[in-house]
Amino acid sequence: MTTTRPATTPDAPATRPAVPAPRPAPDAPAPTPWPDITTVPRSSRARGAVTAALLRRALRELPLRVRFGDGDGDGEPVGRGGPVLEVRDPDAFHARIGTGGLVGFGESYMAGEWDAPDLVGALTVLAAHAAELVPAPLQRLRGLWAPRHPGAERNTPDGSRSNISRHYDLSNDLFALFLDDTLSYSAAVFRGFPATWDLLAAAQRRKVDRLLDLAGVGAGTRLLEIGTGWGELALRAADRGARVTSLTLSREQRALALERVRAAGLADRVSIELCDYREARGTYDAVVSVEMIEAVGAEFWPVYFRTLDDRLAPGGRAALQAITMPHERMLATRDTFTWIHKYVFPGGLIPSTRAIEETARDHTRLRPVRRDGFGAHYAETLRLWRERFTARADDVEALGFDATFRRLWTFYLAYSEAGFRSGYLDVHQYLFTKEDPAR
């Protein structure tokens, strides 16, 4: 498989400041690529003590064993037993969480200040008790203490291009190291568990085929795909005889997807456009979008669904695959800037099933007629990606991605897997139909 060269310097941080940093003097030392990781934030002794007390109070009630490098009074681990979490540098750990909350928790892992022999197991416990970790009085005051999204990361057309590029344009070679041959970067559908690597490609094709079946895609179908990925869905739709227009904001993904289309001899049936969904034109028999809505942002969900409605012919069908979270947690956290936003998916927001269905109802003529959840399949998909990423750490390093980046992505994949294993996250395939007024 041919891939393209990295679009960015690999050992640069996976996030960019919302405001450009001042240009250093000519004789100044080169800036560190991870300034928020190499430097522990300053925290007063009083704040550190309060943070430590609140953390240990919360952790005592969890099925975890948390060991602090300085012990806990009599040296016993904190918690009720279960997966072990080793805090190697309690002062730095408390300082980061006291000043940055959950952003600091993730950064502390990136810095190597804590670890866990079973990282997914420990994070699964924390995800399952996410609503209980912050005391209720502080939850009600979240708007005062939780960081908010930078204005530069709003998903306007220009903001979306920047946000998408910061993740998907890292390097096609990087993604190819841990994805299967289909280069699918979304939940697969397995026939049974446990899943194994040699079954992943077939499970990804099964996922794609289920979506194409939901949308009724066949010979002669005019299909609009919002979010190309690396082209697997467009290829399989064209194999059915459909004529596909696929939209992406990632230059790197588009370049490789076009290579795959040409290699398959399907260039006459597939058009891949570097285009925002809001700029789409034309009328289609079917629209398919796989795990794209998470990058839209709540502010633009009505626009996204109106685009589906406007582009879909009367009597047409739209099939969506969407990650979801509980509605109450979505409402509580929707304005909070998280570690995932800072380092992995800037501008993203996972919707709830209620938010999806209410937005479609209130802003479009689309009606949901089917919804299938399969969160356990996503947990297995992420496990296979994480294991592959870990096994190929030397190859990741050879691409120029440093140790901090590798810990970042290990945490991201484990953190995501834990979300699905705990049930905090789910994934659904939706079918929406648009009634034909002539009938």
Image (cartoon, rainbow, N blue to C red):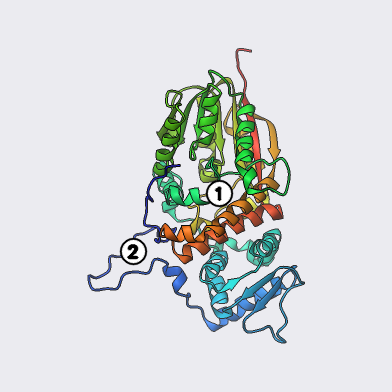
- The residue under the point 40% across, 48% down is 162
Decide: is 253 above or below 397. above
- Around disc 2, counting alpha carbons within 10 Å, would you say few (fewer than 14), some (14 to 19), or many (20 or more)? few
On screen, 431 above or below 341? Answer: above
Q: Is residue 111 rendered to the left or right of residue 359?
A: left
Relative to the observer, which residue lies in front, 109 or 356?
A: 109
Tag 1: residue type? Leu
Percent position (x, y) of residue 130? Answer: 67, 61
Q: Which residue is mark 1?
A: 349
The residue at the point 64 percent across, 43 percent down is 199
Indicate which disc, 2 or 1, sits on the residue closer to the N terminus. Answer: 2
Left or right, 328 with respect to 307, comes to right
For residue 93, above or below residue 348? below
> How far is mark 2 from mark 1, CA to CA?
26 Å
The residue singled out by tag 2 in the image is: 21
Question: Horizontal and vertical percent for residue 273?
Answer: 41, 33
Q: Residues within 10 Å of mark 1 (few under 14, many from 20)?
A: many
In the rendered structure, find residue 241 and report the number of the disc placed on it. Answer: none
Element assignment for label 2: loop
Residue 418: x and y in percent read 66, 57
Identify the residue at the far left of this view: 26
Residue 205 on image: x %, y %? 60, 36
Is 125 situated above or below 361?
below
Quadrant of the rendered image containing residue 321 = top right
